[in-house]
Amino acid sequence: MTVSRVCVNGEFRPLGEVGGEITLLDWLRGSGLTGTKEGCAEGECGACAVVVLRPDADGDSSSWTAINSCLVPAAALDGQEVVTAEGLGTPAALHPVQREMAVRGGSQCGYCTPGFVCSMAAEFYRRGRGGSSAGAETEHAREAPAADHEHGPNGFDLHALSGNLCRCTGYRPIRDAAYALEDPAPSDPLHTRTADPAPAPVPATTTGPFGDYVRPASLAETLDLLARHPDAKLVAGSTDWGVDLNLKHARAELSIGIDRLDELRTYDVGADAITLGAALTLSEIETRLAGEVPLLAALFPQFASRLIRNSATLGGNLGTGSPIGDSLPVLLALDASLVLGSTVGERTVRLADYFTGYRQTLRRPDELIVSVVLPRPLAPLTAFHKIAKRRFDDISSIAVAYGLTLADDGTVAQVMIGIGGAAATPLRATATEEFLTGRAWTSETADAAAAVLAAEGTPMDDHRASSAFRTAMLGQSVRKLFVETNEAQQLGGVA
């Protein structure tokens, strides 16, 4: 009998009876690793961040990836490698990230520090980051200008810390610590570990007081299990379900881990379509596409935080059916289709037909989302407008995505518009699309279309925004699109 266990800080620990309801955070703290903290319990503060070893696209190497341990079930890490703040260094031999945080005053009360350190360590080891040769210990290096306002002279991407919050130290010394990091030493054991593959997923079953967690060995086994247990909870990144576990105390008799199924992790860029496996994380898609789909490239930095994107999947965002999932208006504007699978076979449905009501879709209980298909060619002019109270790591009040094709005479040849947050479901703005098609793309047309778009949907009043504000932002979005596309055409680029 195989014993369920996780390699934590280089040492294997038995999982025990964690079922599907014990999060990695609770399991770690219960194991005595209390450096990892709980702040919000919903993936917004980063106090719970740890690093896990994930496979690179080639499968022959791996990378350290920061995730929110408060969301993912501990059972999902069966057979995997995890490093917490305690495993990075010791008081007598600090890790480079810990040392820079200390000498630059990056920690005060210390509650958030372990999470910052783990997120920073993942970026420290990121392949291709590009180290700094500017001597991190000098005042000159500390004040060296960043390559841009979101990247340091050492290539450090501040988005790596977008999901980590601090309310007493202030962010400048934390940024200074990040920008002072050099390359990992060749002998650094965590650095050398990435030259080899990450552990393969382990098919297993773990029991718990409220239910079981099963990681099937194949998609066929998963579909058979789902056919017999249609009420089972499908768990990939757990960025939505984890919140229900923590804050709503929801429980499932059976949770099925699908995040590492090869059949759900396909990636293909063809002449006629781009196929993205439903269990690829958003970070993996972002890295692999490398700007191939500009509309998705505009979405990713605004989708929650890097910690969330390292776990969240398109399949999960679509599976919840939420009307405010940020990927949904983008996928609508890309005219995406979904491949749904069950024991009786696969079927393809257009995303525009997929949503049937509030958190209701065409997907049957015995089906799961296998992949997302984006038809080509892509629209040459695109834009994604997210209206939220914070620039990053926030839920949108309104989100609008556009795919626009202009004819040689300047008229609108084709336009696709996706809206989130304006109704019980994500919407294709078909009335606005019909209004714009065939018209000259001018400021007057944009003004007229703004009134049409403002009337689409039935926005509501809530704590994020009023109905009137949402309606006004819909109209303004079309005007903003005209300005952006006009500038893009003048520059010969894409909005």
Image (spheres, rainbow, N blue to C red):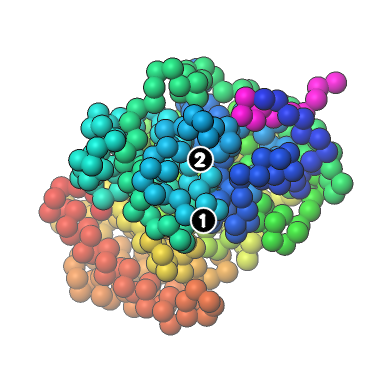
Q: Please state which of residues 199 and 338 is positioned toward the viewer in this rendering.
A: 199
Q: Residue at x 39, y 39 (%)?
A: 100
Residue 421 position within the rendered picture, expressed as x and y whole percent measured from the top left: 50, 68
Q: Residues within 10 Å of mark 2 (few under 14, many from 20)?
A: many
Q: Please state which of residues 396 and 207 is positioned toward the viewer in this rendering.
A: 207
Residue designated by label 2? 118
Residue 70 position within the rendered picture, expressed as x and y whole percent measured from the top left: 64, 49
Residue 352 position within the rendered picture, expressed as x and y whole percent measured from the top left: 51, 56
- In the image, is 277 to the left or to the right of 470? right
Corner quadrant of residue 180: top left
- In the image, is 5 to the left or to the right of 431? right
Residue type of the residue flagged with mark 1: Cys
Residue 491 lies, with reference to residue 183, above or below; the image says: below
Residue 279 appears in the figure:
yes
**SS state under label 1:** loop
Q: Residue at x 50, y 48 (%)?
A: 113
Q: Residue at x 47, y 76 (%)?
A: 465
Disc 2 vs disc 1: which is toward the camera?
A: 1
Residue 217 position within the rendered picture, expressed as x and y whole percent measured from the top left: 72, 26
Corner quadrant of residue 264: top right
Residue 42 lies, with reference to residue 184, above or below; the image says: below
Q: Which residues are magenta?
A: 1-10
**SS state under label 2:** helix
Main SS category, magenta section: loop
- In the image, is 317 to the left or to the right of 382? right
Disc 2 and disc 1: Cα gap in Å? 17 Å
Residue 471 is one of the magenta-drawn residues: no
Residue designated by label 1? 109
Residue 9 is one of the magenta-drawn residues: yes
Q: Please state which of residues 221 and 134 is positioned toward the viewer in this rendering.
A: 134
The quadrant in which the N terminus is found is: top right
Residue 327 is labelled as: none
